[in-house]
Amino acid sequence: MAETYEGAVDRGLEGVVACTTGVSSIVDATLCYRGFTIEDLAEHSSYEEVVFILWNDRQPTAAELSAFSKTLRDSQALPASLVNTLKSLPTKEIHPMAWLRTATSLLALYDDQAQNDDEQSRKSVALRLTAKMGTLVALFERVRQGKEPIAPKVEQSLAWNFLYMMTGKEPDTAFVKVLDTCLILHADHELNCSAFASRVTASSLSDIYSAIVSALGALKGPLHGGANEQVMLMLKDIKTVDAAKEWIKQALANKEKVMGFGHRVYKNGDPRAKILRGMSKELCEKAGMPHWYEMSKVIDDTVQSEKGLLPNVDFYSATVYYSMGIPIDLYTPIFAFSRVSGWLAHVFEQFANNRIYRPRGKWVGKENQKWKPLA
Ligand code: ACO
């Protein structure tokens, strides 16, 4: 007879506290990284500083930040032999998240510390992975356009270099600031699906690359990081501001999910969405495409009034990236470019207080089956 599990949880582990964490916290509509509110960091910090805070549980001194940023910037370039291998991978009809997952796994084969389990090696691996993630995404874009890869400029930030390596042009300072803020906003988010995936893999004492590849696979899905791309595709499908309200009402009547809305934890709004909404309005107007923001606002109001759901981080980030001319299918890879820092903070936290994740499944299948010889 199968065991019964009193209080066995239903689907999705809703409300289950799976571990303790000091990386980031969500309390009502307040998100903090290491105790710093996301609003404070978005306004005053840089992505490089946020990575330092996530990994060290404190703000750096000016000298520490300068040294840390330099190490990150110096680590952005990819080994030439890896670039050659990556150039030979298919890119047509390939989703960039699938390519990025494979490229990250390949990167491990070019990192002679990838399998080391001492603290120092793991820290070096984390630095390299964080520095190179944006380079990989930009490389994908160059390769699929049939263009030569562009090497990063070590004196420039990760955000600057991403835009530079993707387009081949020195980026506009305002766009660099916008992307840097987006990287800050996406860097971590408590025990979300991909962070949990990274921790589960790390809990078997596997290597860091394996943990990050697990996380990339989880982030790719449309219910998680893949939603930002789906939001922009939806806006393109709706086409006009006037059509938005009816389109959404119809989708809800058909029991479809409106991408970029709802959240398992936030019930009073996602603070990142509020910041991104302001950015979307400004950028869409500046880019001469205010209709994308206006359409988003109609959708936001309609989903709230019809369903009581609020936008999450993915909703307004779509129009922010679109107004900057970033290809739609790169939105989720950009999420990964940022979130790798949070995953790594979780992986280190897991290693520091590890016990393998091994939950149980409540048996609901057949019983007493007997094997018979096949005729
Ligand atoms: N559009 C329409 N209805 C929705 C939406 C939505 N976006 N989100 C939730 N609902 C409805 C569900 O249909 C369900 O309604 P019902 O009770 O009438 O059946 C109810 O709200 C609860 O929804 P669940 O899917 O059970 O909520 P859960 O907590 O499991 O999922 C999630 C959260 C995945 C974010 C969900 O809201 C969703 O699918 N949203 C759209 C995808 C999305 O934007 N994902 C990005 C999330 S942020 C991130 O991961 C970076």
Image (cartoon, rainbow, N blue to C red):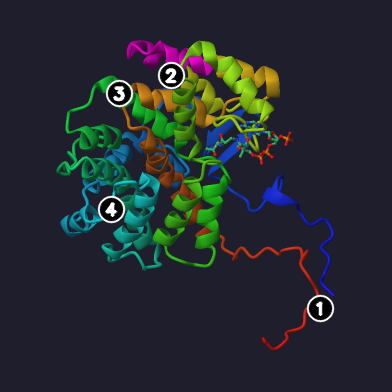
* Of the image marks 2 and 3, the number of the one nearer the N terminus: 3
Q: Position of residue 319 (x, y in %)?
A: 42, 23
Query: Residue under circle 2?
Result: 280
Which of discs 2 and 3 lies nearer the camera? The answer is 2
Q: Residue at x 18, y 36 (%)?
A: 155
- The quadrant where residue 369 appears: bottom right
Query: Residue under circle 1?
Result: 368
Q: Residue at x 35, y 56 (%)?
A: 102
Which of discs 2 and 4 lies nearer the camera? The answer is 4
- Tag 1 and tag 3, C-beta contact below 8 Å: no
**Amino acid under disc 1:** Asn
* Of the image marks 1 and 3, the number of the one nearer the N terminus: 3
Q: Is residue 184 visible?
A: yes
Q: Image quadrant for the N terminus?
A: bottom right
Query: Residue under circle 4?
Result: 90
**Amino acid under disc 4:** Pro
- The quadrant where residue 68 appears: top left
What span is colored magenta in the figure? 281-297
Q: State the separation of the CA atoms marked 2 and 4.
A: 33 Å
Q: State the separation of the CA atoms marked 1 and 4.
A: 48 Å
Placement of 246 over or under 367, stated as above or below: above
- Asked which secondary structure carries label 3, the reply is helix
Query: Residue under circle 3?
Result: 175
Placement of 215 over or under 38, stated as above or below: below
* Of the image marks 1 and 2, the number of the one nearer the N terminus: 2
Placement of 337 over or under 351, stated as above or below: above
Which of discs 1 and 2 lies nearer the camera? The answer is 1
